[in-house]
Amino acid sequence: MREIIAVFITLLAFSLPGIAQDDPAPWQVTVSGQIEAFRAGDGARALTFAGAGFRTQFEAQPDAFYAAIIASGYAPIARSRSHSFGVYRRISDTSVTQVVTFIGSDQKLYEALYQLTNEDDTGWRVQGVILRREAGVGV
């Protein structure tokens, strides 16, 4: 089921026209905060930017959250050298997808599609990420 949702989000994100972006969107602060926490190896801080489902699952073991991210193939994000924001799509008033480009520690390029929701009690939080390798190298 998650794969079907992921494919749907990916298709939706890449099929809609782009939105001009001059100022950082509030969810970009969340994404950057989580990326910086991952780069620092701080699972507890990274978890604070995750959605309620992740926070509930890992609340007693925040370092296990970091380990799960690495084990699930997201090391290019957690160990990235830099990131930049691409287009975003508002799915609803409380849901958005955001494209983020990474230069990995291996200098390869990666693109991630983040799904975020604006949770009532905590603000914008990461619900899921789809990561793929891009052609080329970063400088």
Image: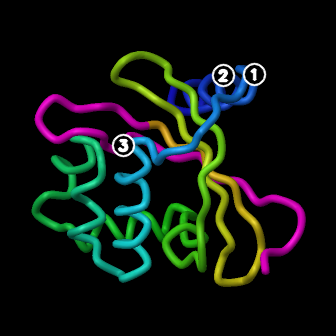
**Is most of the magenta stretch helix, strand or loop?**
strand
Horizontal and vertical percent for residue 94?
34, 23
Residue, x 60% and y 52% (percent of image)?
85
Residue, x 22% and y 39% (percent of image)?
123
Disc 3 residue type? Answer: Pro
| 132 lies left or right of 75 | right
Of circles 3 and 1, which is in front? 3
Dot 2 falls on a residue whose secondary structure is helix
Range covered by the magenta-colored residues:
116-139
The 10 Å Cα crowd at callout 1, few under 14, some 14 to 19, many 20 or more, is few
* Name of the residue lying farthest toward the top: 92
Dot 3 falls on a residue whose secondary structure is helix
Residue 72 sits above or below residue 130 on the image? below
In the drawing, what numbered circle is on residue 26? 3
Horizontal and vertical percent for residue 122?
16, 41
Asked where in the image residue 81 lies, by quadrant, the reply is bottom right
Residue, x 75% and y 22% (percent of image)?
15
Instruction: Answer whether residue 61 is magenta in the image.
Output: no
Which residue is label 2 attached to?
12
Instruction: Answer whether residue 125 is magenta in the image.
Output: yes
Asked where in the image residue 38 lies, by quadrant, the reply is bottom left
Which residue is label 1 attached to?
15
| Marks 1 and 2 close (CB-CB < 8 Å) | yes
Q: CA distance from mark 3 to mark 1?
A: 23 Å
